[in-house]
Amino acid sequence: MADQEDEELQRALQMSMQNSPPEPKRSKPRETAAVATTESGGGPAASLLEESPEVMNRRLQRELMAAAAEKRMMAAKSAASTAAAAVVSPVVPSAAGEGGCGIDTVSRSDRSGLGNVPVRKDEKKIVDMGKELSVAEANQLFSMVFGGNPSKEILAQWTNQGIRFSPDPETLMGLVQHEGGPCGVLAAIQAFVLKYLLFIPEESSNLGSRTTQNFGSRILSKSEDMMPNVLASLTEDNRKRVLVRSMGEILFRCGNNKRAVIATLSVFGNDAEGATGTVDEIISEAPEGLSVNSASDLQKSLRVNTYTATASAFQRLEVMLPVFQSRMGAMLFLFSALLSRGLDSVQADRDDPSMPLVTAPFGHASQEIVNLLLCGQAVANVFDERMDLGGGMFLKGISTNVEVGFLSLLESLNFCKVGQHLKCPKWPIWVVGSESHYTVLFALEPGVQDENEMEERESQIRRAFDKQDQSGGGGFISVEGFHQVLRETNINLPPDKMDHLCNTGFIIWSEFWQVLLDLDRNLGGLKDSSGLRGRKVFDLYHFNGIAKSVSNGNQAMSEGETPLQRPRLTKLKVSVPPRWTPEEYMADVAAPCSSGGNELNQSDAVKAAGPQAAAPQHAPLVDCIRTRWPRANCNWIGDPPSIV
């Protein structure tokens, strides 16, 4: 009898250790069992009182061990239920979430199968969508972005543009633009995406890591075009990962590297009760029925979460990536950047806070939006530091060094002056602005920005001159400012040259520059009597994200053929010839640019570039490149690169 009981006990213990334990059988309580036995008329053990001490001890021991086994089974069942819930709901409400947002996050390893998990009908919410904006905040945000009475066309542009990669094999690294307007947002994100794809090795860029590392030998090769290798190595996971990192870095930059606010949509609630499909599918499809045509709509649909740790913010962006890829993605990211900066701080950054950030009548992103995403401040100007207008009035410019930069066609037309902060970023990537569109220019080799001794000296003098230039980039300064430039740069001008430059009461950069080119180096000048300053040759790539209709690899489409909608990537060969003499340099700078490019002193340019160089080609993009590399000559294959 004792052996049989021991066998049953061992079997119960084994069952309690199984991964999927059966429901435990609960025996009657001792008191109930005793009454039942007594009322039934006895038996071999009519009463517990008649048990021998040995039998009683064995029975008590068996019951204690059975209770322990039952407790173990219930704990295993509870743990299994918790694990299943964690997979379906990667972000759950918490009483004490990060940054006051009421959010707890689950580690990445717990969410590896998120995209393939079907949603159960009894799930009330997939994720915690965050808190509502107040009515006042929603009114301020909507008015700041769109103004008091935006047109339906502008709202349609901004509510129908997702942040999506191109499916075309030739432009896999690029974000596609289908609607006019949000190109400024997409181009800024694109610039940071290229930074991570080209210059931040995957093995040293885990989620939450803020370190950067030179791409080095992975990319630098002067003998072959490495871009096809870069594109061929891209996977869907790579693209999603760098997109999350890029968006996260921009948002934290807007939040002074202290916080990131992520704006999403309240699209679940009770509607998720009958939903079927994967989490990604439901999140991406949910915004389809929403409209944001007013501040009231915005207040009802927008939800925000604030994060102070990069890892948590990146996890949130990773989970909500389908929302940003949906038709409202570009607008939601702009809202996220503005809220990360703080609405009051954004207004304080601006020179004219009464104007909407999205400009009428075409709905283009303003320079303030682009500067916010690139630099973290919504200033309206692109010059360095700030410009004092007198009387306590000043204009704000770019105050810090940046990761990726900006070039403008308007500078080549003398409408503005891009400062050195934006012109010389840490990585060779630039957002390019035209009158109506933003595109991206980049190099695979960081060395394209390296300067020789003479170029470094020129940059030093130009920065000192621009600091004193109060004309808005007009290229002239006062006599007092000129003396300050000479002191800062250790230039000793002979009296006759000093009198010649100062006799009009202001100093023009072009005249000052010509004097420097003819001034000996021991006096602080840039005279180079040897004429051996070598030319620089390098490759640049230009990406235009607008999906345009092109034939499927043919010049002419056959009848019934559907044109492909895809952006364009153009490779440019750039040659920067040496500066031979002051006269040749100034004559070349003053030469007018024409649309055909044949009037741009081609014979001299080809001669300077060398016997193997092709005749330089011209397009508006070349004028932008020349604001960064004066006298640059460019060549490409096929149609000219477009910046519109």
Image (cartoon, helix red, strand yellow):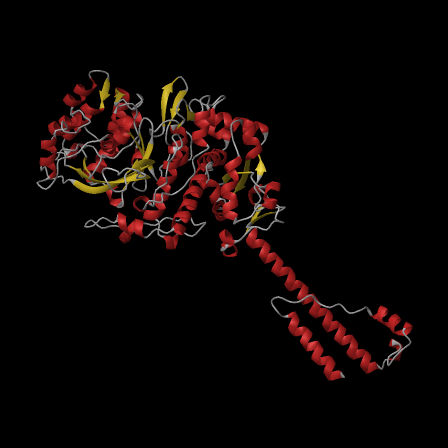
Q: Nearer the viewer, residue 23 or 310?
A: 23
Q: Position of residue 481 (x, y in %)?
A: 28, 23
Vertical relation: 408 (above or below) 57:
above
Q: Nearer the viewer, residue 248 or 177?
A: 177
Q: How many marks?
A: 0
Q: Is residue 347 visible?
A: no
Q: Is residue 498 visible?
A: yes
Vertical relation: 83 (above or below) 297:
below
Which image quadrant: the N terminus? bottom right
Q: Classify residue 593 by image quadrant.
A: top left
- The residue located at (22%, 42%) in the rendering is 539
Most extreme residue toward the top is 504
Q: Position of residue 233 (x, y in %)?
A: 32, 53
Please indicate whether residue 159 sits to the left or right of residue 492 in the image: right
- The residue located at (31%, 22%) in the rendering is 472
Please indicate whether residue 111 sits to the left or right of residue 548 in the image: right
Which image quadrant: the C terminus? top left
Q: Nearer the viewer, residue 636 or 94?
A: 636
Q: Position of residue 128 (x, y in %)?
A: 58, 44
Most extreme residue toward the front is 559
- The residue located at (62%, 60%) in the rendering is 79
Q: Position of residue 557 (x, y in %)?
A: 26, 38
